[in-house]
Amino acid sequence: MAGPGPTFPLHRLVWANRHRELEAALHSRQHDIEQEDPRGRTPLELAVSLGNLESVRVLLRHNANVGKESCQGWAVLQEAVSTGDPEMVQLVLQYRDYQRATQRLAGIPELLHKLRQAPDFYVEMKWEFTSWVPLVSKMCPSDVYRVWKRGESLRVDTSLLGFEHMTWQRGRRSFIFKGQEAGALVMEVDHDRQVVHTETLGLALHEPEALLAAMRPSEEHVASRLTSPIVSTHLDTRNVAFERNKCGIWGWRSEKMETVSGYEAKVYSATNVELVTRTRTEHLSDQDKSRSKGKASLESRNIGRPIEMSSKVQRFKATLWLSEEHPLSLGDQVTPIIDLMAISNAHFAKLRDFITLRLPPGFPVKIEIPLFHVLNARITFSNLCGCDEPLSSVGAPAPGSAVAASGSPFPCEVDPAVFEVPEGYSVLGTERSEPLRDEDDDLLQFAIQQSLLEAGTEAEQVTVWEALSNTRPGTHLPQGTAFEEQLQLERALQESLRMSTETGGPGSPHRTPPALAPPSFEEQLRLALELSSREQEERERRGQQEEEDFQRILQLSLTEH
């Protein structure tokens, strides 16, 4: 196969791995480091796919974009993992996190400047995770993001920090951003340890070597990626359509309205929302592939090892509650905050992708969107300026003050003390006690697995997660636990089935099914999905019956007249 032609000088040097000449060419600043070849690949994407580590190192030193996705939708880091080279993964991962951090810091002044133009406010964003799979939804975590905004100062509080070692990490953290003449001050306040990490934006961006060194991943992190499938979850909204929900059966049907956080809201369904989950396994050993249990098909590619990939597409209905009376501005006040959080938070990234669509009129006081193939997120805005639950930090503006005279539809005074370091806390400067958390979708799914079944045994956790997602984390269990795993899952599924079909109520005694031959994996998964399928069929049957009743009533009324 011939390499790229002379019209792509950087690609030609990468193809031959002539990294010293590549270095000289980039120093001359005469070439576009992000130029795409006829297949849509940048020089960095080509170098990673070829496994040319020296060229990758040169390109990354010259700030080639690690966040670029290929025409097939794969990120540079995912392509690096597919090579199976630990050094390649470590290098790309380090620069990926470094570029994310610098982008986050660089975007803060623009965010604060934009917010300064908008009225001050306080609002709460409640995140609830739900699922259509039996036994799952009630065990999902939830969190409330509390947001204060005053002038060019912003504070966001959270209690669900992420996850580590397969468990949800809880704690009380505040992220404070304050505009300054030199840029911005960023503070991460750990209320549990009573310590504060501070960064001055200008200084952080002028110390790239120190920031890059802090982003170096551990050997364990790299090894974990190389022994786990590459998972990509994409929310496809290209064909989305919005429809008003209807209600009523006796008489004329009307457009559905609901009250959310004190505001009348129109209820819309967003149809044709597709969740695409793709899993690649070509970098895994046979043992790792047997643990993942994925059935991947082999796909040809022009360079590098062939892709082994399985794909799943599921269609969902998202739901929106839109209020035209709500005083918050989605574009001026809320979207900038979501943009900031989305840089390092997978939840907010999916929310941003959805709310940037052309929505019907109104503010989304509540929105429910799919996150993964078994998990939805429901986000509700509430307690605007402490109207539901009063706060000492938020109050009505004094008569004659600038806030009172601003003409804001919801004037409120935010106490400037909420943006200061609490008394008695230790200020540690820019040194962090832990690296920035990685919120990639594959790691998030493992966290969900642990959260769903944290009360059970190790055997239960692995088996039920296999039934829900057809994947399995990289834990090595003794061969003797397999039979017990099967029985635990069967008992859980039988209990779910019993509760949905018995008339005696949930308090009736439960008989453990006889321990016969352990069911196959396919049978376990079939049982789990059958429960959800029955519920869906029943909902559709009721909806069809309601529509038929309405048509009969309508026809009868027309006949009588």
Image (cartoon, rainbow, N blue to C red):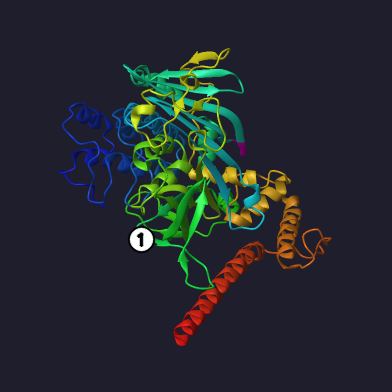
Secondary structure found at label 1? loop
Left-right relation of 58 to 247 = left
Q: What residue type is labelled 1?
A: Asn
Residue 250 picture quarter: bottom right
* Location of residue 257 in the rendering, given as x and y in whole percent from the top left corner: 48, 57
Nearest the camera: 498 or 301? 498
Q: Is the magenta stretch mostly helix, strand or loop?
A: strand
Viewport quadrant of the C terminus:
bottom left
Q: Name the residue under label 1.
A: 239
Location of residue 406 with respect to 2 vertically, above or below:
above
* Location of residue 496 in the rendering, given as x and y in whole percent from the top left corner: 71, 60
Whether residue 555 is visible: yes
Left-right relation of 290 to 436 = right
Q: Which residue lies furthest to the bottom in this view?
A: 559
Nearest the camera: 551 or 359? 551
* Location of residue 475 in the rendering, given as x and y in whole percent from the top left corner: 64, 44
- How many marks the image carries: the answer is 1
* Location of residue 485 in the rendering, given as x and y in whole percent from the top left corner: 72, 54
What's drawn in magenta, residue-wise?
A: 164-168
Identify which residue is drawn at 38% across, 22% down: 401
Location of residue 240 with respect to 551 vertically, above or below:
above
Identify which residue is drawn at 67% across, 53% down: 463
| Residue 217 counted in the magenta span | no
Nearest the camera: 71 or 414? 414
Location of residue 226 with respect to 418 vertically, above or below:
below
Location of residue 362 with respect to 147 vertically, above or below:
below
Nearest the camera: 539 or 329? 329
